[in-house]
Amino acid sequence: MKNILIVFAILLICSSVFGQNVGIGTTSPTARLHVVDSAVLFTGPAVTVSPALFNPPVSGAGSRMMWYPAKAAFRAGTVDGTDWDKDNIGNQSFAGGFNTKAKGFGAFSMGSTNISSGDVSASFGYSNVASGDAALTFGIYSTASGYNSATIGSSNVAQGTYAISLGLNNWAVADNSIAMGANNVTRAVSSTALGYSNVALSTNSLVIGAYNDTTLTDTLFEIGNGSYGARSNALTVLRNGNLGIGNINPTNLLTFAPIGGKKISLFPGSTGDAGMGIFPNEFRQYTDNSNADFTFGYDNYGAGFSEKVRFKASGLVGVGTSSPTLSTGGSGIVAQNNTYIQLRVQSSASAAGMEFKPSTGNQYEIQADNTNNWFVYNRNANAYRLFINGSRFVGIGTNNPTQALQVIGNILASGTITPSDIRYKKNIQLIQSPIEKLQQLNGVTYDYRKEEFPQMGFSDKEQVGLIAQEVEKVFPQLVVTDDKGYKAVDYMKLVPVLIEALKAQQLQHDEDQKRFERLEAQIKLLAEKK
């Protein structure tokens, strides 16, 4: 206490000597308190305490810089009322300027006559209000009342949650809406209005331009350039995907204004027109010259046009030639000027595909027929090389596969695997009596009846194997029957049976060995007694 009295005495003496200015570290103070070459420390409670325990250092009108420890708040500037009194100061808030108010927790207000009443809100400029929590205002005469809303500019309102209003006199009334430009209004959730005097009334809608609007029900997107009394709505997109050009109520995916004339025109002129048209059953590109061809290619600047495809007025189609000799009604599209291969599109009532015809060698076709079959066909050999039927069965060397993959001939593979993880399986049981079951099977040698079944591609060499009907009686799991009743054996599945049979035989051998050893011991014992 003694030290404090000494400091006050020194301050009183200094204030009287220097015209009421106090200097610390200087003999020429220029302000009420002038500190040189040192820091200034203002302290308060270690933690924020109840405001009821402490009032601000000063209340009411006046100009001041004030630290309010009870609320950890700071004020600097001028007020002519109660804006900086205790009840208008938010915890951990900041206000500076003239008649600014930061009433919410963590609020920030800077400028003139701004109010930040929402928690963690901020206002900058003149006569703005940030009343929503986490709201933000920049500019003049603007209000951000929605949660996490924002305004930038003049006379803007952001009323909805997460609403944004930028520019002049815009109103973002609905949640998640954006109004940008001047005099725009968004009244529907997640709607956007950009430009001048646009109104977005439909949920998730977008309006761009001037004096455009969306309806309350269907419009999703609008662009135009009208006037206050006559909305233009030049481009309209509805929720169902319909697009209107000059039509605010499109009934089709693309609807033009209900006026006469061509809708799409390319290179219009006095001597001829060209254009495109979309109709219920066709897409049309046209010219009014009956002798005109359609060509496709590329054009390098300065090098001229290089033609790749030509559609003749007569209906002929050429790829790599400007003078095709076949039409699509004959063999199809012809690629010429190539001595190695010709590509033709083949079609008929039952099949369609492509033909590859080299100048020499075999001619191949890739086709699909009207029964959902796909195949590669060797025209010279009159044989199918690869066949995929409508059931997704694949045949190699056969056009009648009965399994997921059927190969006529041998298969050479570096390895095969079968899913066998225990996590895939249930009802697991050991194979019973494997030896007895194997004894019911007969290993045989045989020859295939190749001449009677040429489609099977059987080998003419002697075979070794089992009879499927005999196997089916003992191991039905090993036999597969096709849709014609012919049977096949899955020899790989015999491996587990053979393993169990070998184990059973080994067990029998071990028991016989033990029995033999016992008999041998008994014989030896009898011999010793004699």
Image (tube, rainbow, N blue to C red):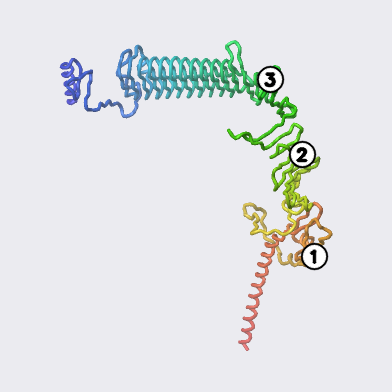
Q: Residue at x 35, y 17 (%)?
A: 97
Q: Residue furthest top?
A: 229
- Looking at marks 1 and 2 on the same chain, the residue that comes earlier in the sequence is marked by 2
- Looking at marks 2 and 3 on the same chain, the residue that comes earlier in the sequence is marked by 3
Q: Residue 447 versus residue 467: which sits nearer the camera?
A: 447
- The crowd level at tag 3 (other Cα within 10 Å; few <14, some 14-19, many 20+) is few
Q: Residue at x 60, y 35 (%)?
A: 303
Q: Residue furthest bottom?
A: 530
In the picture, the disc for residue 447 is 1
- The crowd level at tag 2 (other Cα within 10 Å; few <14, some 14-19, many 20+) is some
Across and down, in percent, residue 26 comes to: 18, 23
| Residue 369 in view, yes or no | yes
Pair 1/3: label in front: 3
Across and down, in percent, residue 483 comes to: 80, 51
Residue 475: name its quadrant. bottom right
Q: CA distance from mark 1 to mark 3?
A: 83 Å
Pair 1/2: label in front: 2
User: According to the image, label 3 marks what residue?
Assistant: 270
Across and down, in percent, residue 462 comes to: 77, 66
Q: Residue at x 79, y 66 (%)?
A: 446
Q: Residue 471 versus residue 111: which sits nearer the camera?
A: 111
Across and down, in percent, residue 86 comes to: 35, 18
Q: Are marks 1 and 2 in contact (CB under 8 Å)?
A: no
Q: CA distance from mark 1 to mark 2?
A: 52 Å
Q: State whether residue 383 is above or below residue 351.
A: below
User: According to the image, label 2 marks what residue?
Assistant: 326
Q: Are marks 1 and 3 in contact (CB under 8 Å)?
A: no
* Total number of numbered discs in the rendering: 3
Q: CA distance from mark 2 to mark 3?
A: 34 Å
* Helix, strand or loop for disc 3: loop
